[in-house]
Image (cartoon, helix red, strand yellow):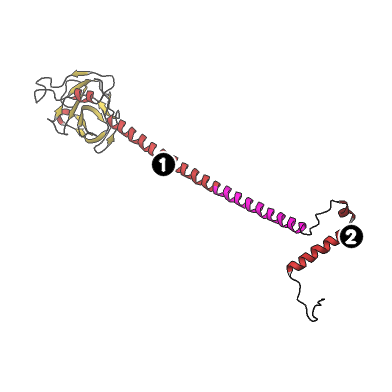
Amino acid sequence: MAFTRATGRHRRPGRMQRSTARAAGVAALTTTGVFGTLASPALAAGPEPEQTGLLPVLTIGDEVADQIDAQAAAQQQAAERAAAERAAEAAAIKRAEEAAREAREEKERAAREAERKRLNTFVPPISGSYVSTGYQAGSSLWSSGSHTGVDFHAATGTSVHAVGAGTVVEAGWGGAYGNQVVIRMHDGTYTQYAHLSSIAVSAGQTVTPGQQIGLSGATGNVTGPHLHFEARTSPEYGSDIDPVAYLRAHGVNI
């Protein structure tokens, strides 16, 4: 029994139907040779594409996807390079800061060491001299009956040096001591330099080891030019200690 489609409006073919029909049409044209007739000589001379009608569409889609993947990979690589450069820059800054900090600390250590050496450096009060009268030697020349310091042999005008770092507390006339200088040393002890012909420092002035503080002479109660040197526990007369032992304890060879 035959059936006929009812007259009236027909539904539009779906997407799948249209694609199938198109593919079928292309296949038919290819089979009959019409496709080859319509194609340009250049296209006709090339290899025939597969007879599915879908390969060109899929090929174009793969190329676009490859381009997108390549762009994404390039962007990822650029981002990784930028991150690596930032990390390298941060590491370089950190290394520079650490190096600067270490340099500052080393400089501070060197300064502290230099200061320590300066404070602990002692020298003889007169270079190349010797003790001509020892500590506590007895004589009627001294009011106490004994020598409260030591005398260093020196002609008038010989340079007299501070034996160590300190601050001048007295600089001027000292009665029987003549022209004198008294220095408070960095460790709290005191040193005295007497019978000077001239004084080169003033009270309140800081001095360094070996700095010239005056010239030897014969001022005050003396029988001839020399340097009278004392080590004391205070700036006052009568607080004297053995000056040779004092200097030797600070590394001076007497």
* Range of residues picked out in magenta: 54-83
Q: Quadrant of residue 230?
A: top left
Residue 15 tag number: none
Q: Secondary structure at mark 1?
A: helix
Viewer-side label of 2, 1: 2
In terms of depth relative to the viewer, which is nearer, 92 or 61? 61
Count of marks overlaid on the render: 2
Query: Label 2: which residue?
Result: 32
Farthest residue, direction front: 1
Q: CA distance from mark 2 to mark 1?
A: 87 Å
Residue 74 lies left or right of residue 16; in this view the side is left
Percent coordinates x, y for residue 124 in the rendering: 26, 24
Query: Label 1: which residue?
Result: 101
Q: Pick the quarter of the image with the N terminus.
A: bottom right
Callout 1 amino acid: Arg
Percent coordinates x, y for residue 166 in the rendering: 25, 34
* Magenta stretch: helix, strand or loop mostly: helix
Indicate yes or no whether the magenta region holds residue 106. Answer: no
Q: Quadrant of residue 62?
A: bottom right
Percent coordinates x, y for residue 190 in the rendering: 20, 32
Callout 2 amino acid: Thr
Residue 230 lies left or right of residue 88; in this view the side is left
Q: Quadrant of residue 179?
A: top left
Percent coordinates x, y for residue 232 in the rendering: 17, 30
Q: Secondary structure at mark 2?
A: helix
In terms of depth relative to the viewer, which is nearer, 221 or 248? 248
Please indicate, yes or no, whether residue 109 appears anywhere in the rendered image: yes
